[in-house]
Amino acid sequence: MSAPDRDLPDLSALSGMEQLRAVVDGHVPPPGISTLMGMVDMEILGEGSVAVSLVPGLQHYNPIGSVHGGVHATLLDTACGCSVHTTLAPGERYTSLDLTLKFLRGITVDTGPVRAVGTLLQRGRRTALAQARLEDASGRLLAHATSSCLIVPPPG
């Protein structure tokens, strides 16, 4: 069995924005986590802003009968990280340093589609700060997160 990264196209010559556009436009497959979690849509709202959506299903439930907090966290982490990703130069990468999350409302299948909107707050040479809001279709805030990311320069 080959390593998953060996089957992915090399996008290192593209900027972060170009990489995300290639995914959104269907030129490269979505990241595995998107498929696994059932993320249904990613929107590039502009440099430093991305939205990702999901329709909650029973597969997202925890034993107490609501969507597991890890689903909230994954959506918010994705929105924060991808907002940073839009600012990357060719060859640059990033990794999350932390994710601080506040759960405000539970999510069930009755909640309907949810959308996490990530916004870059500050981008430096080595670190970036982003935030994301998780909302239902009527705009009610369900959860909020902030994330710091380490910017990794191109090798060499």
Image (cartoon, rainbow, N blue to C red):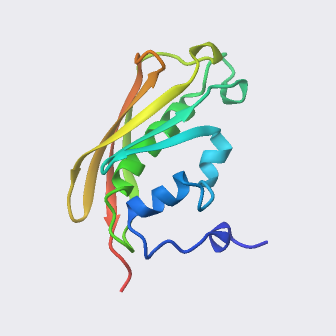
Q: Nearer the viewer, residue 21 or 84?
A: 21
Residue 94 visible = no
Disc tally is 0
Please report the residue visible at 50 percent of the width from the left and 71 percent of the height from the top: 11
Q: In this image, 150 relative to 36: left or right?
A: left
Q: Is residue 155 above or below residue 132?
A: below
Q: Nearer the viewer, residue 43 or 132?
A: 43
Whole-percent x and y of residue 118? 37, 40
Please report the residue visible at 53 percent of the width from the left and 34 percent of the height from the top: 53
Whole-percent x and y of residue 17? 39, 59
Q: Is residue 93 above or below residue 48?
A: below
Whole-percent x and y of residue 113? 56, 24
Q: In this image, 25 relative to 51: left or right?
A: right
Image quarter hosting the N terminus:
bottom right
Please report the residue visible at 54 percent of the width from the left and 75 percent of the height from the top: 10
Q: Nearer the viewer, residue 48 or 61?
A: 48
Whole-percent x and y of residue 80? 38, 44
Residue lying farthest to the bottom in this orientation = 156
Residue 130 visible = yes
Image quarter hosting the C terminus:
bottom left
Name the quadrant containing residue 69: top right
Q: In this image, 33 relative to 43: left or right?
A: right
